Image (tube, rainbow, N blue to C red):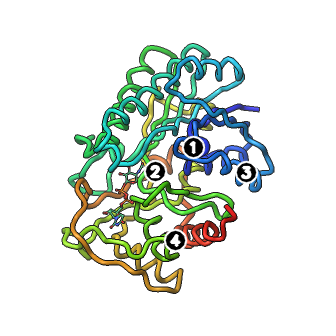
C-alpha cells in the first residue's frame, strides 16, 4: 500500500482528504498536535471508511519529534502538508507566532523528506497569494501580489521555499491554491469545527441560523460588484479533498512536467456574500438574521478561479453546487447542535 503522511490530518480539509485517500487505495497516517483540532474527527473518518487512522500528536516545529515520526514510518512515500495556523485576523495580531509555526513546521517536514528520501510533496496553499487581483478569473500565472496579512505572507513564503528546495534535489511538488473551502462531507460524519467565533462566512451563517450567534454582519455592500458585496469562489471541501488524491496520482504516475507545479482549486464561479446568504435561506427555509456593517480591513473585492489547468492535467471536476455546499454545511451545524459529532 502507498503510505501517505497527512500533516494537520485532524483539521477540516485534512480529515476530508484522508477520507478520499483511503477510499482511493492509499494507506494514511496523520500528524497533528491538536492545538487547533480534535483527534475525535478521525473517529468520523473511521465511520465513513471503516478504517482506523493513527494520529501522531506531536509538534512539527520540534525537529527531533518530527524525525522520529519518519524513523518509525520508513514506508512513507509522500506527504500532504496542511498543518499551519490559518486565521487572517489572528495573524495580524501575532505575526511572529505565524511565521515561527507555519514556516518552522514546513522547514522541518522538508528536512525530513530530504533525509528520508520522500520525494512526493503536496502543499496546501491558498488564493490569498493573489492578493486583490486586477481581474478574475485568475489563472496560476496571475501575478502574486503583496499579501494582505502575515497569514497570506506565510503561504507566499512557503511556496517560494518549496520552489527553491526542488531545484536542489529530486523532490516533486504540487502547490494547491484553494479558493474558499466550505461545506461538510455528505455523510455528515465530519465537518468544520471552528474554534471560537467564526471569522469565515459560511460557519458564521450556519451558527447564526442555529442560534449560536444572535446576528451576523455582512462586511460591506458598497463594493463595485453586482450587488455591492464581495465576490468569492466557494468550493466544497470534498471537491478540494479529491484534488489532493488526483495530485498525488499525478506525481506518483510521473505525469508532471516540472518539479513544482501549481493548481487553482475553485469552481470558476464567483458568488457575492448576499447571494450565498440567499442560497442558504433557500435551502434552510428560514430567513437569516444579518445586518450590513462596514467593510472588513484586508478584504479582497472579488476573486474567483480559472480552473482549466486542474481539470486538464489532474482530471479534476468539481461535483458540488453552491446549494450542496450550503445544505451540507447546514446539516453539519444541526448535527453539532445535537452534540453527536
Ligand atoms: C468571505 C467573504 C467577507 C464573514 C479567508 C482566507 C483564505 C481562506 C478562506 C484559508 C468576505 C464576508 C465573512 C462574516 C462577511 N482561508 N464575510 N461576514 O476572507 O475570502 O478568505 O478564508 O486558506 O486564505 O483569507 O473568507 O469566509 O472570511 O470571507 O460578510 O461574518 O465573506 O467580508 O467578503 P476570505 P471569509
Q: Please identify the quadrant where the N terminus is shown.
A: top right
Residue at mark 2 to residue at mark 3: CA–CA distance: 27 Å
Q: Position of residue 88 (x, y in %)?
A: 34, 48
For the residues labelled 4 and 3, the Cα–Cα distance comes to: 24 Å
Q: Which residue is mark 4?
A: 326
Q: Residue at x 42, y 45 (%)?
A: 86
Dot 3: element: helix
Q: Which mark is residue 313?
A: none
Q: Earlier in the sequence, mark 1 or mark 2?
A: 1
Tags 4 and 2 in contact by the CB under 8 Å rule?
no
Q: Residue at x 31, y 65 (%)?
A: 231
Judged by depth in the image, the label closer to the viewer, 4 or 2, is 4
Q: Quadrant of the C terminus?
A: bottom right
Residue 110 locus on image (x, y percent): 50, 22
* Circles 4, 3 touching at the beta carbon (< 8 Å): no
Any mark on residue 265, and which? 2
Looking at the rendered image, the disc whose residue lies closer to the viewer, 2 or 3, is: 3
Dot in front, 3 or 1:
3
Q: Work out whether residue 315 can be spotted.
A: no
User: Picture coordinates of residue 80 (x, y %)?
Assistant: 56, 36
- Counting residues from the N terminus, which is met first, the one under dot 4 or under dot 3? 3
Tell me, yes or no, whether the two marked residues, 3 and 1, touch with CB atoms within 8 Å. no
Amino acid at each position: 500500500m502507498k503510505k501517505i503522511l497527512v500533516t494537520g490530518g485532524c483539521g477540516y480539509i485534512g480529515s476530508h482528504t484522508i477520507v478520499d485517500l483511503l477510499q482511493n487505495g492509499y494507506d494514511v497516517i496523520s500528524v497533528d498536535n491538536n492545538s487547533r483540532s480534535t483527534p475525535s474527527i478521525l473517529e468520523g473518518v473511521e465511520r465513513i471508511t471503516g478504517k482506523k487512522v493513527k494520529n501522531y500528536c506531536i509538534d512539527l516545529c520540534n525537529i527531533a519529534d518530527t524525525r522520529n515520526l519518519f524513523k518509525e514510518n520508513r514506508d512513507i512515500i509522500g506527504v500532504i502538508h496542511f498543518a499551519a495556523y490559518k486565521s487572517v485576523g489572528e495573524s495580524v495580531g501575532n505575526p511572529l507566532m505565524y511565521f515561527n509555526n507555519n514556516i518552522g513546521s514546513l522547514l522541518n517536514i522538508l528536512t525530513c523528506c530530504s533525509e528520508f528520501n520522500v520525494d512526493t510533496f503536496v502543499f496546501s496553499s491558498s488564493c490569498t497569494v493573489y492578493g486583490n487581483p486586477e481581474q478574475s478569473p485568475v489563472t496560476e500565472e496571475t501575478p502574486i501580489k503583496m499579501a494582505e496579512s502575515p497569514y497570506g505572507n506565510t503561504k507566499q513564503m512557503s511556496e517560494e521555499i518549496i520552489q527553491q528546495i526542488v531545484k536542489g534535489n529530486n523532490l516533486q511538488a504540487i502547490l494547491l491554491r484553494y479558493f474558499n473551502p466550505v461545506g461538510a462531507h455528505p455523510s455528515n460524519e465530519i465537518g468544520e469545527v471552528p474554534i471560537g467565533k467564526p471569522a469565515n462566512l459560511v460557519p458564521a451563517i450556519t451558527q447564526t441560523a442555529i442560534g449560536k450567534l444572535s446576528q451576523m454582519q455582512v462586511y460591506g455592500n458598497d463594493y463595485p460588484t453586482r450587488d455591492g458585496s464581495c465576490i468569492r469562489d466557494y468550493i466544497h471541501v470534498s471537491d478540494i479533498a479529491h484534488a489532493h488524491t488526483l495530485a498525488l496520482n499525478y506525481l506518483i504516475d510521473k505525469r508532471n512536467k516540472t518539479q513544482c507545479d501549481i493548481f487553482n482549486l475553485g469552481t470558476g464561479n464567483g458568488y457575492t456574500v448576499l447571494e450565498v446568504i440567499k442560497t442558504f435561506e433557500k435551502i434552510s427555509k428560514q430567513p437569516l438574521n444579518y445586518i450590513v456593517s462596514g467593510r472588513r480591513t484586508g478584504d479582497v473585492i472579488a476573486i474567483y478561479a480559472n480552473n482549466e489547468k486542474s481539470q486538464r492535467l489532474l482530471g479534476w471536476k468539481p461535483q458540488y453546487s453552491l446549494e450542496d455546499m450550503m445544505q451540507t454545511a447546514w446539516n453539519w451545524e444541526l448535527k453539532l447542535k445535537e452534540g453527536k459529532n
